[in-house]
Image: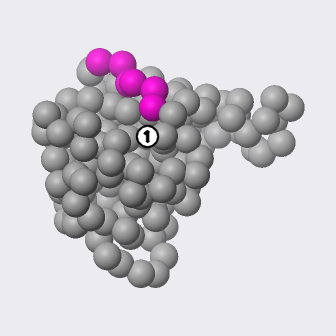
């Protein structure tokens, strides 16, 4: 399976009166999500399925991404919320093994930790808002191969 990983776009500053989960995308974040969707559409590499965290900023990112890529709406998955563990992600992704290409929309530091874990790497992976990456994985195996990583300025 190809696992496309998208960090949510740029969101409102911390300190939202309804809590972190209610933070919305700002215009720049919406543009980042659309650019990622357009990039994969033009490359003929759109996902068969998009899964998203239930937090507002990730659902909005997934919505903009899916519209731009002209694909079905994302499915909300509670396990993608802040604090996702790599082992849990792989266990959950195993349930979607019938799909060739799956995208997840989530948060930091969860996404960079997942990438490090799959690659067996140490050190820092900079995964800014709007960053897009793709790995070849075989859930529930821990092994992964990085196929590409696109910072938001290039997406």
Q: Give me the residue at 19% from left, 48% from top.
A: 2
Q: Name the spot of residue 85 as percent of width and height, x first.
A: 48, 56
Residue sitting at x 86%, y 32%: 17
Percent x, y of residue 44:
13, 36
Occupied quadrant, residue 133? bottom left
| In this rendering, position of residue 103 left or right of residue 109 | left
Q: Is residue 41 visible?
A: no
Q: Is residue 133 left or right of residue 40?
A: right
Please state the total of marks drawn on the protein image.
1
Q: Give above or below for 141 relative to 16.
A: below
Using the image as rendered, state which of residue 89 and residue 24 is in the foreground.
Answer: 89
Our reading of the magenta stretch's main secondary structure is: loop
Q: How is the image coloured?
A: one colour
**Percent coordinates x, y for residue 79 in the rendering:** 48, 40
Residue 18 appears at what percent x and percent y?
A: 81, 29
Residue 141 visible in rendering? yes
Please give the name of the residue rendered at 26% of the width and 48% of the height, measured from the top-left corner.
3
Q: Is residue 36 above or below residue 69?
A: below
Magenta stretch: give its range.
72-77
Count residues near mark 1 (Cα–Cα under 10 Å), then give few for <14, some for 14-19, many for 20+: many
Task: Compare residues 76 and 57 and report the one nearer the observer.
Answer: 76
Question: Which residue in the rendered view is the most extreme toward the bottom?
Answer: 122
Compared with 71, 107 (above or below) is: below
Q: Which residue lies at the image location 45% right of the left edge and 31% below the top edge? A: 77
Give the residue number, with chain letter if any, for mark 1.
Answer: 105
Quick one: SS at disc 1? strand
Q: Is residue 100 left or right of residue 36?
A: left
Which image quarter: residue 141? bottom left
Would you say residue 44 sits in the magenta stretch? Answer: no
């Amino acid at each position: 399976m190809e696992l496309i990983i998208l960090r949510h776009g740029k969101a409102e500053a911390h300190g939202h009166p309804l809590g972190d989960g209610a933070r919305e995308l700002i215009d720049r974040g919406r543009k980042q999500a659309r650019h990622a969707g357009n990039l994969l559409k033009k490359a003929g590499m759109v996902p068969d399925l998009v899964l998203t965290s239930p937090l507002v900023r990730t659902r909005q990112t997934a919505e903009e991404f899916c519209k731009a890529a002209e694909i079905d709406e994302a499915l909300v998955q509670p396990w993608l919320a802040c604090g996702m563990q790599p082992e849990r992600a792989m266990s959950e992704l195993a349930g979607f093994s019938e799909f060739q290409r799956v995208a997840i929309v989530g948060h930091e530091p969860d996404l960079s930790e997942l990438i490090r874990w799959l690659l067996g790497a140490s050190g820092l992976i900079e995964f800014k808002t709007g960053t897009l990456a793709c790995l070849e994985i075989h859930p529930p195996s821990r092994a992964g191969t990085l196929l590409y990583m696109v910072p938001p300025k290039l997406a």
